[in-house]
Amino acid sequence: MTQPTSKTSDTAAHGVPRAKLLSPLLPPSQVRREDICNRVLTAGAARLILVRAPAGFGKTTAMAQCRADMDRSGIRTAWLTLDSADNDPVRFIAGLSALVAALGADEVQAPVLDLGEAAPLLMERLADCDPFCIYFDDFEAIQNPVVISIVRALIHHLPRQGRVMLASRSQPDLGLVRMRGRGQLLELGSGELRFSFHEAQAFFSQRLHQRMREEDVLKLHRETEGWAAALWLAGLALDRLGARADFIERFSGSSQLVADYLMEEVFAAQPADLQDFLLRTSVLRSFDATLCEAILGPGSTERLERASAADLFLVPIDGEGTYRYHSLFADFLRGELVREHPAVIPQLHLAASRWYETQARPVPAIDHAIDGGHHERAMNLLEEQAEALLEGGRMRLLSRWFDGLPSAALHDRPLLSMAKVWAVCLTRGPWEAMPLLDRSGWSEDDPLVAPHVLALRPVLLAMMDRYEAAHQQGLSNLPALPTGHAFADSVLANTMAYVFLVMGQYRESHRLLGTARRSQGGAGSRFNSMYAETIEGLLELEGAQLRKAAARFRFAVHANGSDSVRHTGGNAFAGVPHALAIYEAGDVDQAEHLLGVYVPMARDVALRDHIIQGHVVLARIAFQKGQLDHAWDLLNRLEQEGHERRLPRISASARLERSHLFVLLDNPDAARAELERAAEDEDDVWQRVSRLRLPAHDLEDLAMGRLRWEALCGDAVLALRQAEQALQLAATQKKRRRALKLQLFKAIALRRQGALSDSLALLARLLQSLSGEGFIRLLVDEGSVAGQLVQLLQAHPQFLKGVHGNPLFDDYLQRLLRAFGPLAPLTNQPDLAPLDPLTPKETRMLQLLADGLSNVELARRLSVSDSTVRTHLRNINNKLDAQSRTQAVAIGRRLGLIT
């Protein structure tokens, strides 16, 4: 087995507790789940093996047996037991890294720090690994959609020889429908996990060391319906009572009644000192002899050994004496402790908190202090860790702790008051955090909290989409920098740099970023780097410099070399633009996976433009793949998000994109209706959008939506007039990417108006601009109308003067056409006049060619030299895109240039 057997500390590589990487030890006598193990070993096509059932169905044991079988078969395995703390994406990535290391990946590689690309990069390290399987136990503990998205990406990027097996009490959101349809999913539910009669019979024989009457086993099996936990509990009781008929007869099949009755039976049979030990240790999530001795005093080691020998629901989590209680038994013990000895509970938690503090483990120390009601102690410990926790982005942990502390107790603790505001801001949103800040009574006049207050107000206003107010507040606060507080200073500086960008004050944005770079070092510099590079990239993208922008975004998502950037929601600020740049370049699948990770992170920290763009692009991807229901669902969720966050700009953006998709579905009436719905808040939303430089609306706003509708569905003449006006405005505002989109709509409108030559000439110039930067989706997102226009251009290469035959451009054109997908073949192609008209002398020479004159006769007839004749012929061929004089004559006749 590939799990480690030696132990030098309770923490493995990557900071992951070793106990989490060890599967439960299998006792020598156990019921072999033969059918389950065989199905797992022979499921060669399955990428995911899902074991899903309620508590007590033996999921973990079945997985441990499968793991042992795989190890014996030469398949490498790695195990991770999950808990609620793994909802922290950074902690989860550390666990994944430890799994990859356990499977034999190169340990010397740099740690994976970018959450969006973590799964692909980690799986890439296993590309050359022997066949392997990764096990996740207790997956129901994972509720964070960011972590779920990382697991989804991990499964997608598994090498061919890799599999994932996970156990969960609930159905995880891992794209099961798609995997099921592709035959890549093996599901084992409660039906498969229920003990058969023969397995129950074998279980009782091993447990009781004697053969029970068949009718008694049948009775217990029928009443429990093969529920492993109930059979186990019954076995514990029968082990002490003997196979008594009255017990078997009174046995109930109700799981709650079974658990309550049997746990009381087991507990009551223990000596008083062991009962006391069980009750008092139930406050601990895990324990070993050292911890028990420290909390309960001498004799605890001996009682722990007796409890283990008596099999009192102790689950070993490593091979060296660390245990936890079975969850059902732990719940029972805690309930009994509350009922019998409530006064000792605070003392036990206090002892545990003190012990963990001596072990330099502040998180469980604070947990126990709060659980025991020792709020003063918890706050003292928390004050020592608050700065590090803020820098480390542990906002969910902080929020949970503050929920367990009385608000009034924080009043005289300014640092904790500010930490609570930050935690609430970045986990529940600015609308709850702003009143909290106001009620705290602290202001920038208080030196202890001034840096936090100075940063928080502009940040909260910006998160509320109130950029104008954030701009005004920030201008007042920026002169106070630097305050000497790296976390607050860096958040204020970078937030205001983004606010300046939105307000169109690019010079001020650059200046502030430069000031921040010069004034902060170390972790703050890396934090700044992520923001700075992203903002620079957004500016370059607006200027249609896709390659430079993509490089900046790629650098930015890798710029989190320190935990100091995690309070931003990982690197969602850079991650969504990074994914969008990948999408624009045509890598739809990779963009979809990255957005699946980054968009939930952006939602957590209320990044409005990221939320809008992420949902819109995910809806477009779903639409392209024919998943219309999913596309509508994404836009419905986006609209609902706007209502819940009280941000009409988000809701209006969802309606605008619905209009776009209805245009692509050739449903102009529905598209028009959605446009009208999007315009309901025109005064409040779109006029404000037109004044600001919001990244989500560089290409998509009400004016662009209306132009799209007219160009593709409505009045082409009106569309041309609107496009010309919009192009002039875009040039004035230096919005080059927007200008490129406008040129596409103009080309489409020209074709619909009947000016095909002008349309193709404009499209040719547009493609030459786009090809150098690698833009794909800017055209493809407008559907088959744009695709057919590109087809027509390919069929008339005379419009591609200067690039036709260029390998780089030809490759771009082919990639572009592939991205459009299947297009209807061109029929009845019109003949087009040459892009560069023939001169009168060239037209006369072409007519003489048609009359059959040779070069010598042409020179004599036109009174020119033989060299001049050759020059004219070469120009004629170039203009008509002809390869010979015969072809030039044929084209000239077809175009009506000659008779």
Image: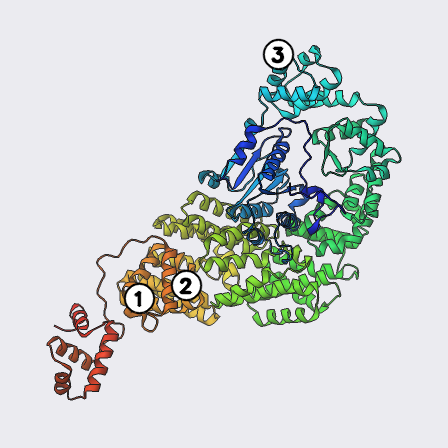
Q: CA distance from mark 1 to mark 2?
A: 15 Å
Q: Which residue is mark 1?
A: 760
Query: In this rendering, which labeled residue sits more in front, label 2 or label 3?
Result: 3
Label number found at residue 215: 3
The disc labelled 1 sits on which kind of residue?
Leu
Specify the farthest residue to the right: 298
Query: Circle 1: is it few (<14), some (14-19), or many (20+) Cα within 10 Å?
Result: many
Provide residue 684's location: percent of width, then percent of height: 52, 56
Specify the farthest residue to the left: 851
* Rendered position, 405 above or below 680: above
* Side (left or right) of 15 relative to 678: right
Residue drawn at (56%, 30%) of the image = 36
Residue drawn at (73%, 47%) of the image = 11
For mark 2, give the secondary structure: helix
Provide residue 285's location: percent of width, then percent of height: 75, 37
Residues at badges 2 and 3 in contact (C-beta under 8 Å)?
no
Q: Along the polypeptide, which appears first: circle 1 or circle 2?
A: 2
Please identify the quarter of the rendering in which residue 790 is found: bottom left
Label number found at residue 741: 2
Residue drawn at (36%, 63%) of the image = 813
Provide residue 794's location: percent of width, then percent of height: 30, 63
* Side (left or right) of 690 relative to 829: right
Please identify the quarter of the rendering in which residue 286 is found: top right
Residues at badges 1 and 3 in contact (C-beta under 8 Å)?
no
Location of the N terminus by quadrant is: top right
For mark 1, give the secondary structure: helix
